[in-house]
Image: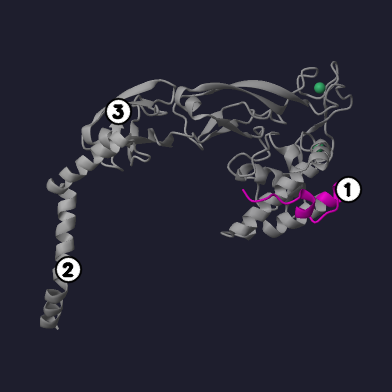
Amino acid sequence: MATKRCYYEVLSLTKSADSDSIKVSYRKLAMQYHPDRNVGNAEAEVLFKEAAEAYEILRDPEKRQRYDRYGHAGMDGMAMPDFGNADSVMDLFGDLFGGVFGGAGKGKGRRGPQAGNDFHLGIEIDLIDAMKGVEKKVKIPRDVNCKACSGNGCKPGSTPVRCKRCDGKGVVIQGNGFFRIQQTCSGCGGKGATITNPCTSCRGAGLIQEHEELVLNIPPGVDDGVNIRHTGSGEASRNGGPPGDLYVQIKVKKHSFFLRNGADLHCEVPVTFSQAALGGEIEIPSLDGKKIKFKLPAGIQSGEEAKVPGKGMPSLRGTRMGDLVLHVRLETPRNLTKRQEELLRELSELDHKHISPHRKSFLEKLKGLFGQSESDSSKDNKES
Ligand SMILES: [Zn+2]
Ligand SMILES: [Zn+2]
């Protein structure tokens, strides 16, 4: 991933910027780079999302303070809202601009209750965990409904009062005739009601941040890059809608010996010259620490592959087990003992008498090359 730009830099602001200038600056950029005005412009889309992310952090005093102190590192693992999701960007946008660009779309508009934000989380696991499946505990900071007020933001015993400005609709229509702009009511922030006696636990927000521990069941066979969705484990909705979802992206660490390719595991097996020639049983370590006995066929060549069926990875869906693919690497002996050298010299004599198929064709090619130049040139002359 490219280095993230500083949020203040993104919005062309200094660190002392007040909330109004943050809003103004974001509004300017959002107008400039809005997808509706830059159809098919990938660069504009990136800048639009970048500005939206910066705005989302800097407009929230708590997140801004955390960012000021720790920078982007402070935001890691905070499970950022999903900005890759056009809907959430549109929702954010809709809050600011009302209906200028024609609503949030997809029936997820401001009229109905909105789902909470999704969380995205990355988890790194070992290859063995990907083979056997694993339980991972994660702590997720997220806004949950305040228990003291059951999420309505009011001190127990009191209730929200219907907003007079919008008559409880949450939106106001401005302008007339052709240009009618629907805007979120500033009196109640779109909730349709105001709180006169706020809950002391959540200061009227209805939500508090908790670090909830979740046990994630990572299934056997999971591959690098797979996204697991936990429905309803995202952020609580701010206006009575369903909670968002949690997406966990799996990163499988590279193994020092086994290389994974889909359901198959690959590894390199060094064999001696005599093992390759004669064949025989060899022992190979398996991923789960056991030893696999494998019968090496006589005459296997360096670079040739041999398969141990069913000793690879399980597949995420279905029952098939992948294979273990052995890549044979012939090790030429070095630092020979006297006896080894004697035997090899003896063997060498025999090799001259019994020429192997590959060497035979190699020698024939050589012969052909030396005898070729004359016949080749005469052939060329005939053709031209
Ligand atoms: Zn409360
Ligand atoms: Zn209102």
Q: Amino acid at mark 3?
A: Pro
Q: Nearer the viewer, mark 2 or mark 1?
A: 2
Q: Quadrant of residue 287?
A: top left
Residue under label 2, please give it: 370
- Tell me if residue 314 can be seen: yes
Q: Is residue 236 left or right of residue 298?
A: right
| Secondary structure of residue under mark 3 | loop
25 or 273, which lies in front? 273
For the C terminus, which image quadrant?
bottom left
In the rendered structure, which segment of residues is drawn in magenta? 1-22
Q: Is residue 20 left or right of residue 275?
A: right
| Secondary structure of residue under mark 2 | helix
Q: Residue at x 81, y 37 (%)?
A: 66
Q: Quadrant of residue 195?
A: top right
Question: Which of the numbered marks, if any, corresponds to residue 309?
Answer: 3
Q: Nearer the viewer, mark 1 or mark 3?
A: 3
Q: Is residue 293 left or right of residue 381?
A: right
Q: Amino acid at mark 2?
A: Phe
Q: Residue at x 16, y 48 (%)?
A: 352
Question: In the picture shown, does residue 331 fall above or below 214?
Answer: below
Task: Work out how far the residue at label 1 is from the one at label 3, CA to CA, in angstroms.
Answer: 65 Å
Tell me residue 210's x, y (percent): 74, 24
Residue under label 1, please give it: 18
| Mark 1 Cβ and ligand 2 under 8 Å apart | no
Question: In the picture shown, does residue 37 fall above or below 319?
Answer: below
Q: Earlier in the sequence, mark 3 or mark 2?
A: 3
